[in-house]
Image: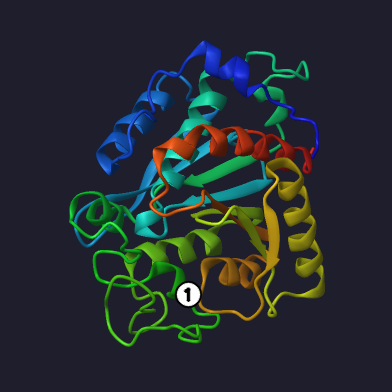
Amino acid sequence: MVALIGNPLQAKAMGFVYVDVSKQIYSYDEMMEDIISISAGHEDFVSYSTLTTTSQGRSVCLLKFGNLASDNKILITASIHAREYMTSQLVMRMLEEYILNYDVPQANGLTYRQMFDSVCFYVLPMINPDGVTISQFGGTPRIKSNGNGVDLNRNFPLGFGQAPNAAKKPGLSNYPGSTPLSEVETLVMATLLNENDFVTCINYHSMGELIYYGASTNSAEVAIGCKNMANLVGSITGYKKLYCGNAIGSFADYFGSVEAAPSVTIEIGTATPTPISQFDEIYNRNINVWPEVARLYQ
């Protein structure tokens, strides 16, 4: 495992102000409040916007963080699957650490401002707010789909409908939709890729403590990049690596094709919904991933 370049123990001692990790449920409404709170006063390196509105009226938000003028754009996604909502909590807590301590020297003597000076993160902290809300409050905690019963991570064009367990109708999971990009959540993600050139992408899912990488549809260059990214992230988190194989309509499949850039999918936790008792370990394993990935583009 590589040396940790951040200092999570120092950050924890300094305390957190906004993102609550003392309880299991981290809701869409709480996240929206936290986005506003942690961004306030930091407009030189943080911005946020609403990309689209879901069928149930919730916002799919994008935060930009780091050097907002940088061409080295790194995409971060979380909670594309409803029951995997701890990934939103994780991403938001990590953002709070970076933003509120942006000019505080870390264990390596560098500040986050210095570490992130050459990159701009595009963060989608909750792609599926309708599904997350149903999972948390609707009596179906294990739902993966969005409010229309579509599994958003099977709704992309590459390999659409080819997952071995694809469902035939809307439900809790695995239904790819009637057509590729049929959902506003996936359509806006496709638009984001069309409008930006991303150098890499990290997708947060749960569960398994795994790093998925690569697809049979990758070019040789992208395949090498995915493997290298998986090795780097694995060296930081200690998670095992697993090659994905055939495209099945996932966002990672689509990203590699459209952007011709590498990505990894980080699966946190050992259960889903991931119990809050696992949060601290997950956080400490992942807090140094973004700085290390950023270092690739210095």
Q: From what the image shows, is residue 219 above or below residue 101?
A: below
Q: From what the image shows, is residue 255 above or below residue 157?
A: above
Q: From what the image shows, is residue 129 above or below residue 118?
A: below
Q: Is any part of residue 151 visible from this angle? A: yes
Position of the C terminus by quadrant: top right
Q: Quadrant of residue 291?
A: top right
Residue 213: x, y in percent?
68, 64
Q: Name the residue rendered at 67%, 50% in the picture.
A: 239
Q: Name the residue rendered at 57%, 26% in the picture.
A: 98
Residue 141: x, y in percent?
28, 56
Q: Nearer the viewer, residue 246 or 158?
A: 246
Q: Is any part of residue 44 visible from this angle? A: no
- What type is the residue that disc 1 sits on? Phe
Residue 255: x, y in percent?
59, 66
Q: Name the residue rendered at 72%, 43% in the picture.
A: 293
Q: Which residue is mark 1?
A: 156
* Left or right, residue 125 beside residue 294: left
Position of the N terminus by quadrant: top right
Q: Name the residue rendered at 28%, 84% in the picture.
A: 169
Mark 1 lies on a secondary structure that is loop
Q: From what the image shows, is residue 12 above or below residue 257?
A: above
Binning the other alpha carbons within 10 Å of mark 1 as few (below 14), some (14 to 19) or many (20 upward) gives many
* Left or right, residue 134 beside residue 203: left
Q: How many marks can you see?
A: 1
Q: Nearer the viewer, residue 267 or 78?
A: 267
Residue 144: x, y in percent?
35, 64
Q: Nearer the viewer, residue 137 or 69?
A: 137
